[in-house]
Every structure is written in structure tokens, then in C-alpha cells.
Image (cartoon, rainbow, N blue to C red):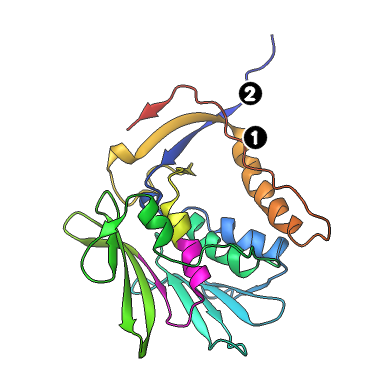
Amino acid sequence: MPATPETVEVDFITPRHLAGGGDPAWITVPLHRACGWSHGNDLLMPRVLLSSPDQKAILRLEPDPDGQWWTLHHAAEPDRPAWYASFGARTPVELIAAVTDTVTDPAPAADAPSDPYGALRQTGWSPYGDNRLVSPDKTAYIERLGTPADPEAWFVTVTLGMHQKVWQARFGEHTPPHVVAAFTSALADPKPVLRIDRGRSLPTLAPSVVQSTDVRAVYVAGALEERVQTLAARHAIAPTVSIPWRQQSARNTRSR
């Protein structure tokens, strides 16, 4: 009798902005292996630095209980001043990856979205005051600060309970609109994100946002490698086809 494939319990979480931070390797490993970013760290400090091959961008991951854990700085270019984006510790890595994937894309699509509000409006985010949208579950909002005379900055904030801040993403006033739109498109995506370290990823005990499912361990283990290969293929001369992450059919599905 053939052996039963090994499975692991995976939490699929939606809305994804409540999924917790996740594994930083989802960002750092593809930047290094697929995009050629060099890395460095300080053995005496809990931080990681990744710099782009052209030295125009640097990503810093540095635990800071009073500030943002992820900070992306991009140098000035002929058509744009220097800009930055930063993300709190519990910002889901899938959302940050949407930004780094966009920044490292060697051939961005001409029709890539450039309106940070666009995808959110399409998925039910509604107006909430001036220059602000709020998510359908009222736990997240995006706002634009500034005036035409004073360049605008974008803030995405997630709260729980009595407006307790869970995480915040900040985009400086000179951040390219399509970079902000990549983040908000990932934020609006209705597909759940997965977590396998249940009890540590969720910043809340809200059971309605979690669906627990047994998934073959080989698929979970291979997800990061598939992501690396897909991003590396963007640099190939010949067109390539991305290989999506395989979703195992649900078994013993439970909600918490």
C-alpha cells in the first residue's frame, strides 16, 4: 500500500492585511538569487542590507520596536528625486514583495496600474473623509497627504480593536505612482495568503479570517523556489511563462 504523502497544516488568511508579517525570505531570497542584489549584515546587529546591482536602491531590514522594520531607499534619477517606502513589522511580506518585484522588473508592462486607489475601489474600499479609502471590514485605510504645491505622500494603516495600529506602510512624496499602485493592488487582491507558523503570524485572534487546510508538504516547501525561478525568468531574453504556485485540493478544511 503506497505511503500517504506528508502534509502540513496551512492557514489561508483573508483579508490578507491581517495575515501578519510572514517569512522575510519571501522578499530577500528572490532579490538576491533572482535579481542579483548583494547582501550584507552585521553579526553584532540584527539587520540585513540588500543593494541593487546598479547601487541605486537599498533595502534595509532592521527590527525597530518604535518604527518601521523594512525601508527601501531609491537614489535620485534624472526624472525623479530620491524616494523611499517603509513598512511595519507585521506588514505581510506578499505586499512588500509586490513593491520589490515592481522595482526589479526589467520590462514593466506599459499598461501597469498607476492609480493607487484603482484596485481598492474595484474591491469595495469606500471613501472615508478627504483623500482616504477604508477597507470593507473597516480595519485598513489608505490616505494621501499633501497638496499640488506640496508633493503628496501615501500612508496605508491597519488597525484592530480600539484603533490599535497593527502595521503601517509609508511611501514618500516622490515614490513612483506605479510602485504605490503595485502595493495597493496586492492589498486589494482577494486571494488569501498562507501561513504555516500559526499562533505567531496573526496579530489577532479573530477566527473568521483563517481557514486551516492540510496541504502536501512538498508544495509548501517548493513555493519559494518557484517564486525565485519565476522572477529569474523575467531576465531571460526569450519570453517565458510563469509557473503559478500549485494549490493542493483542500482536505480536512477547518475554520477557526
Using the numbered discs, state the Cα–Cα distance from disc 2 to disc 1 in whole angstroms: 9 Å
Residue displayed at 47% across by 62% down: 183
Q: Determine the secondary structure under disc 2.
A: loop
Crowd rating for badge 2 (residues with CA inside 10 Å; few <14, some 14–19, many 20+): few
Q: Earlier in the sequence, mark 2 or mark 1?
A: 2
From the viewer's perspective, tell me whether residue 252 is left or right of residue 15. right
Region rendered in magenta = 168-183
Q: Is residue 71 above or below residue 230?
A: below
> What residue is shown with label 2?
5
Residue displayed at 35% across by 30% down: 255
* Quadrant location, the C terminus: top left
Q: Is residue 1 above or below residue 202?
A: above
Task: Find out whether the residues at labels 2 and 1 contact each other: C-beta distance under 8 Å.
Answer: yes
- Which percent across, then down, holds residue 101? 60, 62
From the viewer's perspective, tell me whether residue 129 is left or right of residue 238. left
Residue displayed at 35% across by 71% down: 155
Camera-side residue of 198 and 75: 75
- Which percent across, then down, holds residue 71? 49, 74
From the viewer's perspective, tell me whether residue 230 is left or right of residue 122. right
Q: Amino acid at mark 1?
A: Val
Residue 179 falls within the magenta-colored stretch? yes
> What residue is shown with label 1?
218
Work out whether residue 124 can be spotted: yes
Query: In the figure, residue 205 lies in which quadrant?
Result: top left
Residue 119 falls within the magenta-colored stretch? no
Work out whether residue 91 can be spotted: no
Camera-side residue of 169 and 78: 78
Camera-side residue of 65 and 52: 52
Q: Determine the secondary structure under disc 1.
A: helix
- Which percent across, then down, holds residue 59? 56, 74
Residue displayed at 62% across by 18% down: 4
